[in-house]
Image (spheres, grey):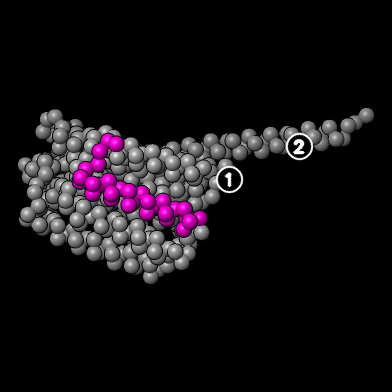
Amino acid sequence: MYDLSAATAAATLEVNTGWNWLATAATSESALVTLVGVVLLYLGAESLVKGASGLSSDLGMRAAVAGVTVVAFATTAPELVVGVLSGLDYGATLGLGAIIGSNVANIGLVLGLSALVRPMDVSGETLRRHVPFMALAALLLVGLGLDGTLDRVDGALFLVVLGGFTYVLLNAADDPGAAPTDADRVAADGGSPDDVATDGGSSGSDGALAGGPAALDRLTAPVPVAGRRVRPLDLVLVLVGLVLLVAGAQRLIEGGRTTLYYLGATDRFVGLTVLAFGTSLPELAASLISAARGEAEFSVGNVVGSNIYNVLAVLGVLALLTPVAVPASTGAFDFPMLLAFTVGAIALMARGSRVTRLDGLVLVVAYVCFFSLLL
């Protein structure tokens, strides 16, 4: 006799097995896409940072200013691309989560791990001129977001404050009383920031190109630009970096969101974790390299500058394009965490104008606790 219930159970099991296989395959594919996106972001940021650093040297910028402007803005480019694209394609909440998560990761992971590699002195210029704007950016974000929305007026205000920050930096660049750093002295001798604290006198790219074909030699030959001489190779690196960043950001958003979607995660969680960590990789790489070379100005300035640009530039542009809804969970948990990490970082930097290895360990442990609370 035909057992209908057994047949039905078998069919149901077969269907469920098929769906489970499809979900597993889709998740694996999404994870691969996410990994490709992270790799492209990293390569793009490396190219952009190298080209931007070269341009800053070509244009005669001091190391302290270059670290918190050109390098910091270059490493913030992933957050800008990811934040704007994710906000326009999937909703601004995803972009907001990525920005908050990235700022927390910059302090907990980037600054913390950099200090573990080598204790870092914090210059008086950074404490007086740059750190206050990092605090102001965090306070503005929390204050303007408490009503549940970041609208176009809020975005415009962010950009106005960014203009004030830029004005302060330009004045600092013209300050004749600022003491030159090792990177400044290398640049004055015709080198680049990459030459600092390395054996030998040439950067990796120049060494690789020396004696190469004439076409490559022309890329490294400086050309006059507004009274300065700029290498075409630096411009090429910037353009290539931007292209890779856009491609990587698209794949990171697509893969990360799809992977966690199958796991039942919300857009807020995706932004605070996968997107935040992926977009913080350039800051992590740049700061760790700077710390290993003993260039604390680049490492600390990169973190401070990136946290400023993330809020004022990225959220400023995103809020101008589309209103950003602030979930209740963001106001109840994410904002307090952002303020706690910001205040903690400022306290550590101001205490003795130095971030020690113990301070770095505290920051890393704090970030691990933050991440565990999200799970």
Relative side of 69 to 211, left or right = right
Please report the residue visible at 8 percent of the width from the left and 43 percent of the height from the top. Answer: 185
Of residue 294 and residue 317, the one placed in the foreground of this image is 294
Q: Amino acid at mark 1?
A: Gly
Q: What SS does tag 2 mark?
A: helix
Q: Main secondary structure of the magenta part?
A: helix
Of residue 240 and residue 56, the one placed in the foreground of this image is 56
Q: Is residue 137 magenta?
A: no
- Farthest residue toward the front? 351
Mark 1 sits on what residue?
Answer: 264
Q: Quadrant of residue 172?
A: bottom left
Q: Quadrant of residue 204?
A: top left
Of residue 371 and residue 74, the one placed in the foreground of this image is 371
Q: Quadrant of the N terminus?
A: top right
Mark 2 sits on what residue?
Answer: 12
- Farthest residue toward the bottom? 153
Pinpoint residue 265: horizontal percent, then vertical percent. 55, 46
Q: Which region is colored magenta?
A: 329-358
Relative side of 21 to 373, left or right = right
**Label whose residue precedes the other's in the sequence (2 or 1):** 2
Q: Is residue 227 above or below residue 231?
A: below
Q: Amino acid at mark 2?
A: Thr
